[in-house]
Image (cartoon, rainbow, N blue to C red):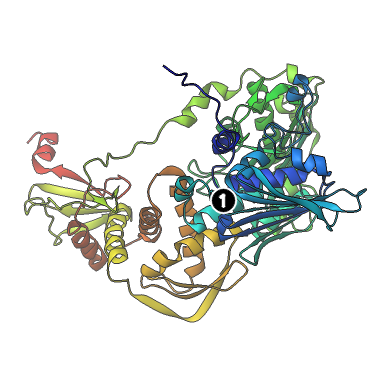
Amino acid sequence: MPDIIQLLPDNIANQIAAGEVIQRPASAVKELLENAVDAGADDIKLIVNDAGKALIQVIDNGRGMSETDARMAFERHATSKIRNIEDLFKIRTMGFRGEALASIAAVGQVELKSKRAEDETGIFIEIENSQVIKQEPVAVSTGTSIAMKNLFFNVPARRNFLKSNAAELRHIVDEFIRVAMSFPDIFFSFTSNGQQVFHLEKGSMKQRIVQILGNSYAAKLVAVQEQTDYMNIYGFVGKPETAKKTRGDQYFFVNNRFIKSAYLNHAVMNAFNEMIAKDSFPMYTLFIDLDPAQLDINVHPTKQEIKFEDEKIVYAFVQSAIKHALAQFSISPTLDFELDASIQSLDAVSKPFTDDNKSSAISSSLYNTFTKKNQSHFVDNKSELRHWKDFYEPREHVPVDRWPLVDGEATGIRENHINNQQRPTTENLFQLHNSYIAVQTERGYYLVHQQNAHERILYERFALAIEGKPMATQQSLFPATIELTTADAVLLKDLLPDINHLGYQLEPFGNNTFVIQGTPADVNQGNEKTAIEKMLEQYKHFSNDLKFSKREKLLRTLSLQQSVKAGISLTEKEMKNLINDLFNCSMPSSTANGKPTYLEFKKEELDKLFGR
């Protein structure tokens, strides 16, 4: 028998390695932007076409490369940032594994132009399928330009797994924001299909946050800054009133590297305990500076998950720093010309800070935490860390395994099994607490939750409309315009075809602005902007929570957002229509998300309660 084990050819080995590093266009964007930052650039331009599938180009004014370095950069495990094993445990740069360019060259057609300041001419290299096709001198300014064309051209199976252009562009926007947020002292621009998406001038951290997340945060940020001998924490958190139903505006950076950490997020949530609703999430952009020897950043291919040597200390410091910042904001806010006028009327601002107040503050454990030397060795053991697992309790959902499939996925519509004996009569009904409707049946009575009931009605109405005849639109006499953040604008463009089918009439107006020409008949005139903003927030909330298609999430979002809310008084006619519409639904007993729409109370059970 011949030997059967053999070494893989380099181009195949590179493609396998590329599967770890380059999963989609956004992965290449991340690696190229990080390389530009590591090159010392202070002007970085990102250009993409066809959501990165046709072109991804990053142009920087960094230190550039020599001819030899330019060739070596595309070899596997080639890096300028590690010389010995000790260097691996004191990483300060963004990229370091030496696989990014090799992986990009394995799955795309790459053109590199680079020049150092001391060289008269630069170098041009063209690579395809890991093979150098052309290498020649070129006249180019100092810095580096890398263009990757036709991603996955040689791996068509991988290309087929890419999502729509709008979905891939959203991922690119996310990666761009994560890098740009870390370095406010660098100019960044982002152009997609010839249109500028971001133009971020150099400035302060606060200016960069407002540039990216929108002017609505300009006067609603609280500075966080604590320095200890173990670690430093700085950045901003949003005031409690900026909390949203989605986690979208939350950024953690460790040594300027974006990370995802449910554990540290829980520390932030604890700091906001009882200041925001339990189902809301605060905005934060927080930076942790820590000795690289205290963490391991090489535990995940994308380097977005890291391990701390002592995560409990980091947890305690994050929580205490935010509590301290919020407490300082409440007691003695710094002078800010953009401060809300309403803040000036608070007791904490208008009343003097007496000696009693001062002595009380000094004696508190929070004050001691930040005034002792070597605080890292005095972490309070009475913290609520033992409750952190509560945060991970999974939400219960009504099982959908028996629901029918539409477009290959389960939906909340099935056949109506309500018989005449169970069907309520609308002759005797009344409203309780402006939230519930009591309605009589032959067997007893139903207690109907008006919002859940209306959600079910709207969900089925939207589901029929999106598959068939579009819903009626009421034209706006005075069309309103709505300006969104870049990420929300990209999301709305992706949803436009389905949204317009459900009664909205929106048109892009350039520069992240949309014109609202018409709305569904049940959206009040003058409330269009709020309705769309809430719809986008709810959609992102569902995106984090449920693994459904874009269309299914949109149906659930709109039915939840447009339903009549608990606490609203209904007329008798409105209650009758609601009950009739509910029990004409194919599945009247619950919302699409599994919440009950009504509870049944049988007459014989009521008789037993009264001893009859």
Amino acid type assigned to the residue bearing label 1 in the image: Leu
In the rendered view, would you say 120 is above or below 236? Answer: below
| Residue furthest to the front | 1
Residue shown at 79%/47% (left/top)? 334
Q: Is 418 on the left or on the right of 175, as rendered?
A: left
Q: Nearer the viewer, residue 253 or 220?
A: 253
Q: Residue 609: x percent and y percent? A: 14, 35
Using the rendered view, name the quadrant where residue 288 is placed: top right
Q: Nearer the viewer, residue 254 or 126?
A: 126
Q: Circle 1 sits on which residue?
A: 151
Residue shown at 57%/74% (left/top)? 509
In the rendered view, would you say 301 is above or below 377? Answer: below
Q: Residue 273: x percent and y percent? A: 56, 36
Q: Nearer the viewer, residue 556 or 23?
A: 23
Q: Is 425 on the left or on the right of 8, as rendered?
A: left
Q: Residue 148: x percent and y percent? A: 64, 52
| Residue furthest to the bottom | 477
Q: Is 160 on the left or on the right of 73, as rendered?
A: left
Question: Which secondary structure, mark 1?
Answer: loop
Q: Is 250 on the left or on the right of 91, as rendered?
A: left
Quadrant (top left, top right, bottom left, bottom right) of the N terminus: top left
Quadrant (top left, top right, bottom left, bottom right) of the C terminus: top left
Q: Is residue 376 visible?
A: yes
Q: Nearer the viewer, residue 198 or 399?
A: 198
Q: Residue 193: x percent and y percent? A: 61, 65
The mark total stands at 1
Q: Is residue 143 visible?
A: no
Label 1 CA crowd tier, 10 Å (few <14, some 14–19, many 20+): many
